[in-house]
Amino acid sequence: MKKFLNEAVDFVDEMLDGIYLAHPQLTFVNDDKRCMVVARRRSGKVGIATGGGSGHLPLFLGYVGEGMLDGAAVGGVFQSPSAEQMNEVTKAIDQGAGVLYVYGNYSGDLINFDMAAELSDLDGIAVRQVVGNDDVASSVVGEEHKRRGVAGIVFVFKAAGAAAAEGLPLDEVTRIADKARARTRTMGVALSSCVVPEIGHATFSIGEDEMEIGMGIHGEPGISRQPLAKADKVVDEMMGRIFAEQPLGQGDEVAVLVNGLGGTAKEELYILFRRVSQLLTERGARVKHVWIGEYATSMEMAGASISILHLDEELDRLIGAPADTPFFSHRNA
Amino acid sequence: MKKFLNEAVDFVDEMLDGIYLAHPQLTFVNDDKRCMVVARRRSGKVGIATGGGSGHLPLFLGYVGEGMLDGAAVGGVFQSPSAEQMNEVTKAIDQGAGVLYVYGNYSGDLINFDMAAELSDLDGIAVRQVVGNDDVASSVVGEEHKRRGVAGIVFVFKAAGAAAAEGLPLDEVTRIADKARARTRTMGVALSSCVVPEIGHATFSIGEDEMEIGMGIHGEPGISRQPLAKADKVVDEMMGRIFAEQPLGQGDEVAVLVNGLGGTAKEELYILFRRVSQLLTERGARVKHVWIGEYATSMEMAGASISILHLDEELDRLIGAPADTPFFSHRNA
């Protein structure tokens, strides 16, 4: 296991120490470093919270900041945070306008965030939930409720965060987050496994010349293991599955996220984006927003995912709005 | 070789296609995609150009943009761009105030950029040069002119870019760039090799439990190969070598860059920064600017480097000034 770490058991907490030292705009509540909130809260604004396992930086906590999220409950590596953590975050960020939870569709998170919502209700805080399920590889059409949330959730964070920053009320922020969720599709491909520090060996094995299309960000099985193909062919297959559900064409506008899973060079992400752009242009669709880099990782896993958000006027405005978090920064031109 | 690519020979040009499609604020001159310049040039401003081999994204071209660089000559993977490319970039970005070259200390780059400076002189353009040599592992004290330029060059880009944006004249911008260079020290450690696409196999081999302290970003030999140690011990050794040359203490202020070489998870970079911060705080030094992430890579190489810039008032202001490039964004709070 070639990682910079001290004791595996301290991986998350020492990472958090580094995060708080580096980013003083973040702080924590209830004496628990794993209950992260923005240091400056804006009165009257709808709060947006997320949470999830560690090992996915920038997910989840990296988007806590201006114009995106107000708080995050931080779990162990690939483990859900507790309901109590999420409730503490909720209490800290509520400014009287209620709180929206945006998180990925995983059973542990669903149970704990449901419970957190109940606890928060007892505290008199209105809570809504939007559950990211953008990974088209994880179920057939018609069973979207079974789909995992992966990198496309960052589009939901961005749209919801900008809506809250505009001062919209909880039900409106929820409507927008849910619309961004419903209009986002992601396909991933893995080339190597990651190593969970406390386990110390690869989560799965994959041949030197193989790729796995549709693998999840914790190493969940994908839909096909194949010989590693040329980059354009890989993109064609991934985008084919996205287009099957999002028949984009003339006049459609999209945001594109080409996400590195951790161990893949940025140069390669641009080679992938080149083909994504060609395919969209061939169909007459217009790329309005482009994010390329590491947005949702599996630590050092090699691989990539492509997320497409089918914009409308409202989402275009919100995706393009200014934001400033430790891992995401956008300002208007 | 587990990379997303089509033909190895097209790696750089297809990457550049992706870059131009994603970032319309960048363009190229002389019909050569490898002669990159900012699309909007500001009249009367000193131009700043860099250049170097590909395979190091965000280096070099990723810092072309507002508040940093005006142009970059792009070479093949780990290969110097030509004098002609650099001269074309120079002619395109010169606004009558002259051009500063900032690049790393490698023999090919030195030869080609010297020649480009001569060509540009014949074109009537004043050119100055500052050659980054921040890698303390690559020579002993007293022979700093032999040192390689590595991640710390980004501090030089930032300081020089901000100085030019303030409207300072060429000699002042050069003075500031040279001061940032002289006050920056970097130490790196590699855990794995990268694979050059046209070669197709690892540049060097390293054992499953080994690290190499001081390795260069092209796989140049370091100063010691050792069993992989705990993260804090690795940082202690690296910072020990930096402190030996930069005896930072009470009242000193620094900028810190913890740079991932490509294949190392962001979580680990924060674990490294935690210790860097502890060591600086123990000495009474104050961390004013923190950059953590991938700033200068060797494609998918696992490993990290630590760069320390010893600030003065002027550098503090310039490092903190706004900037907006495809790979670097900072705005004032």
Image (spheres, coloured by chain):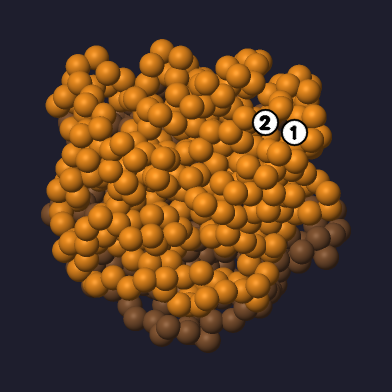
Chain colours: A brown, B orange
Q: Which residue is mark 2?
A: B127
The percent position of residue A45, horizontal first and vertical second, equals 49, 24
Q: Residue at x 28, y 70 (%)?
A: B206
| Front residue of this view, candidates A201 and B71 | B71
For the residues labelled 2 and 1, say whether their Cβ atoms are less than 8 Å apart. yes
Secondary structure beneath disc 2? strand
Q: Relative to A244, is B213 on the left or the right?
A: left
Quarter of the image for residue B144 reads top left
| Front residue of this view, candidates A86 and B213 | B213
Q: Is residue A1 visible?
A: yes
Q: Is residue A123 visible?
A: no
Identified by mark 1, the residue type is: Asp
Give whichever of discs 2 and 1 has the lower sequence position: 1
Q: Kindly identify which chain the residue marked by label 1 belongs to.
A: B
The disc at residue A317 is none
Mark in front: 2 vs 1: 1
The disc at residue B121 is 1
Secondary structure beneath disc 1? helix
The percent position of residue A203, horizontal first and vertical second, equals 30, 73
